[in-house]
Image (tube, grey):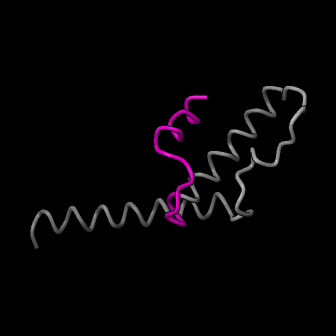
Amino acid sequence: MTVLGLLSMGLDRLRALQKERAAATMPPTGDKPPSANRTTGDTMPSPAQRAEELRKLIDHHTYKYYVEANPEISDREFDRLLES
């Protein structure tokens, strides 16, 4: 087997592990990301509420990207979520 073949097998296994982890941490909850459930005019959330909302949003987009292979946002937008 060639080195390229071994690397390819390693990448396939890594992708499979990422999908398994995403599936275990984020069960499907519907088509809308968590922030879409927020109504307009709400008061500003507490830092703990915002952190929980960001966790749910990141988990949602991780699931859509790795498990369903159907991302809803760009990689750049996802990176911005992680930096929030």
The picture places residue 18, in percent across and down from the top left corner, at 47, 59
Q: Residue lying furthest front in this view?
A: 40
Q: Residue lying furthest left in this view?
A: 2
Q: Is residue 47 left or right of residue 69?
A: right
| Rendering quarter of residue 1 | bottom left
Q: Front-most of 41 and 17?
A: 41
Give, as a single range, the part of the protein colored magenta.
65-84
Q: Front-most of 6 and 45?
A: 45
Residue drawn at (59%, 64%) of the image: 23
The image quadrant where one finds the C terminus is: top right
Q: Residue lying furthest bottom in this view?
A: 1
The picture places residue 76, in percent across and down from the top left corner, at 47, 38
Residue 74 drawn in magenta: yes
- The answer to whether 34 is drawn above or below residue 70 in the figure is above
Residue drawn at (54%, 48%) of the image: 73
- The answer to whether 39 is drawn above or below residue 80 in the figure is below
Q: Is residue 78 left or right of residue 15?
A: right
- The answer to whether 22 is drawn above or below residue 79 in the figure is below
Residue drawn at (62%, 45%) of the image: 58
Q: Is residue 12 left or right of residue 71?
A: left
Residue drawn at (57%, 53%) of the image: 72
The picture places residue 59, in percent across and down from the top left corner, at 63, 50
Residue 25 drawn in magenta: no
Q: How many marks?
A: 0
Q: Is residue 76 left or right of residue 5?
A: right
The picture places residue 30, in percent across and down from the top left corner, at 73, 63
| Rendering quarter of residue 4 | bottom left
| Rendering quarter of residue 27 | bottom right
- The answer to whether 7 is drawn above or below residue 49 in the figure is below
Q: Front-most of 14 and 62?
A: 62
